[in-house]
Image (cartoon, helix red, strand yellow):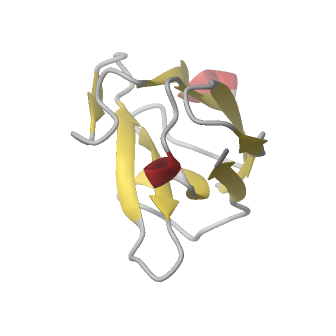
Amino acid sequence: AQFAASGGELVQPGESLTLTCEISGWLSSSTILAWYRQATGKQRDRVAIIAPNGTTSYADSVKGRFAISGVTTGNTLYLRMSDLEPEDTAVYYCNSFPAQSWGQGTQVTVSS
């Protein structure tokens, strides 16, 4: 499958933003999907996952502020981000978990 994230932009601290991931190609109905992010000079980290049954899990740094949604058969994955902080600034990617080949990411910048 191929993954393409979009929706990133420059926002101010405290604002909200929703990212969209378009998934193309074949994807097993048992695939776990995830959002990742990579800040400049840092490693890429997983921030949220969603299992086929809808179970979700979040990194401690985003818990309570981010919400992942979408299902494999719908071919679209979302990441709703609220109360954004400057530390959330990064390029965001969507992929399976474990990750396959990386596709297009989207830049989120949180700054006043």
Taking the view exactly as shown, the residue that stands out farthest to the top is: 54
Q: Is residue 7 above or below residue 101?
A: above
Where does the image place residue 78, in percent across and percent down from the top left?
Answer: 61, 28
- Residue 30 left/right relative to 101: left
Q: Nearer the viewer, residue 100 or 109?
A: 109
- Residue 4 left/right relative to 94: right
| Residue at image location 68% in from the left, 65% down from the top | 103
Quadrant hosting residue 98: bottom left
- Quarter of the figure with the N terminus: bottom right
Taking the view exactly as shown, the residue that stands out farthest to the front is: 112
| Residue at image location 44% in from the left, 43% down from the top | 34
Where does the image place residue 40, in percent across and percent down from the top left?
Answer: 53, 76
| Residue at image location 55% in from the left, 27% down from the top | 14
Q: Is residue 75 above or below residue 64?
A: below
| Residue at image location 72% in from the left, 55% down from the top | 106
Where does the image place residue 43, in percent across and percent down from the top left?
Answer: 38, 76
Where does the image place residue 63, in percent across and percent down from the top left?
Answer: 29, 29
- Residue 40 left/right relative to 58: right
Counting every numbered tag in the picture gives: 0
* Residue 39 visible (yes or no): yes
Taking the view exactly as shown, the residue that stands out farthest to the bottom is: 41
- Quarter of the figure with the C terminus: top right
Q: Is residue 60 above or below residue 50?
A: below
Q: Nearer the viewer, residue 99 or 7?
A: 7
Q: Nearer the viewer, residue 17 or 77?
A: 17
* Residue 22 visible (yes or no): no
